[in-house]
Amino acid sequence: MKTIRLSYNRIEAGQTIASELAYLPITLSTANGSVELQGLLDSGSTVNVLPYTVGLALGFSWEQQTIPIALTGSLSKVPAYGVIVTGQIASFLPVELAFAWTQAANVPLILGQVNFFMEFDVCFFRSQSAFEVKPKPSRK
């Protein structure tokens, strides 16, 4: 099974090596749009989180959402709704990813336990500033 290895990134210029994080290039798509962006791999996050502006770019309408999601931590007071998008990483087969689409625009795209880490195996090599990603064994 194919594995990709990527380096940790500094999102803002001038940051130190201590501020490097595991950002994964990913394409998100719906029938109404597609965006290429960097998702933060966050094994401590229970859910995937979609920033408000990205949801708009994918064609979602806030007023038409019907599945409220209660977020925790620093986003606990921000409304969110459940949405499904197609995610594509490198040459891997596309997968359906469930996101908590939040009204917060100043958060990164977060790839969390439900359901990113259920679809992909990730190994972190922090001492090497690298990580590896591969589809779960049942996918090709």
Image: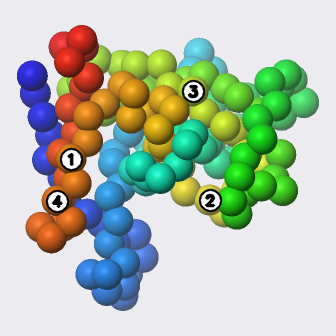
| Quarter of the picture holding the C terminus | top left
Q: Which residue is drawn at 77% across and 41% down?
A: 70
Camera-side residue of 82 and 88: 82
Q: Which residue is drawn at 15% across and 70% down?
A: 127
How far apart marks 3 and 4 lie (CA) works out to 26 Å
> Contact, CB < 8 Å: mark 2 with mark 1?
no
Q: Residue 107 carries which label?
A: 2
For marks 2 and 1 on the same chain, the one whose residue lies earlier in the sequence: 2
Q: Name the residue under label 3.
A: 98
Q: Is mark 4 on a helix, strand or loop?
A: strand
Q: How crowded is mark 2: few (under 14 residues within 10 Å), some or many (20 or more)?
A: few
Q: Nearer the viewer, mark 2 or mark 1?
A: 1
Above or below, 91 relative to 6: above
Can you see residue 30? yes
Amino acid at pointer 3: Ala
Q: Mark 1 points at which residue?
A: 123
Q: Which of marks 3 and 1 is in front?
A: 1
Above or below, 70 relative to 6: above
Q: Which mark is residue 39?
A: none
How far apart marks 1 and 4 lie (CA) works out to 7 Å
> Contact, CB < 8 Å: mark 1 with mark 4?
yes
Camera-side residue of 34 and 6: 6
Q: Residue at x 47, y 53 (%)?
A: 44
For marks 3 and 2 on the same chain, the one whose residue lies earlier in the sequence: 3
In the displayed structure image, the side of residue 58 where residue 77 appears, left or right: right
